[in-house]
Image: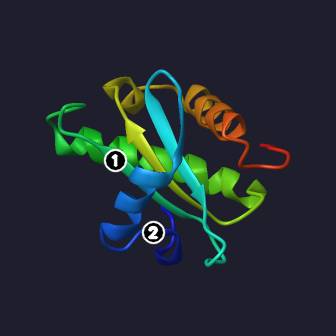
Amino acid sequence: MIGRNNRFHGRGGIQRLQRNGKSVRSGAFALRYESNPRRKAYRLAVVVSRKVSKRAVVRNRIRRRLYENVRILSSNFTAPYDLVLVVYDEQIAAMPPEALKADVKKLVQKAKLTSAVSG
């Protein structure tokens, strides 16, 4: 799980990011992002709708898995970013860890948020 200083607090920041941020999309999820020079660390939110899965257990599993993958890649971020991952497919809950890590890494590279991604 990510730390308190890496979470959004309230809806204002997420709504601003949804309006003004840039977006990249992979098959199962999308990443909205924007640089935030006023912060020292990145902020992350994962949005998993009830349309993805009716079961809260599955939605929370997806959320935890994505938080962990971004946390691992965050040491390579070039600047503090505001990030929102929007999930569109339930398959992420059962995806093998290596495949999920590769998908998240590919999406972060596509958004050009890192200098050199390792791991």
Do callouts 2 and 1 mark residues in contact (Cβ within 8 Å)? no
Q: Is residue 79 left or right of residue 6?
A: right
Pick whichever, 80 or 70, lies toward us.
Answer: 80
Q: Amino acid at mark 2?
A: Arg
Q: Which mark is residue 11?
A: none
Q: Is residue 93 left or right of residue 65?
A: left
When the figure is inspected, residue 31 is found, relative to residue 40, above or below; the finding is above
Residue 99 lies, in percent from the top left, at 59, 25
Please identify the residue farthest to the front as the structure is shown.
20
Q: Amino acid at mark 1?
A: Val
Secondary structure at badge 1 equals strand
Secondary structure at badge 2 equals loop
Pick whichever, 32 or 54, lies toward us.
Answer: 32
Q: Which mark is residue 47?
A: 1
Look at the image and tell me in which quarter the C terminus lies. top right
Q: Which mark is residue 7?
A: 2
Q: Residue at x 36, y 74 (%)?
A: 9
Please identify the residue farthest to the left as the structure is shown.
54
Instruction: Give neighbour class at mark 1: few <14, some 14-19, many 20+ (Cα, 10 Å).
Output: some
Please identify the residue farthest to the right as the structure is shown.
116
Numbered-mark total = 2
Q: Quadrant of residue 12?
A: bottom left
Q: Residue at x 52, y 70 (%)?
A: 6
Residue 97 lies, in percent from the top left, at 56, 33
Give the mark nearest the N terminus, 2 or 1: 2
Q: Residue at x 61, y 77 (%)?
A: 39
Residue 34 lies, in percent from the top left, at 58, 56
When the figure is inspected, residue 73 is found, relative to residue 8, above or below; the finding is above
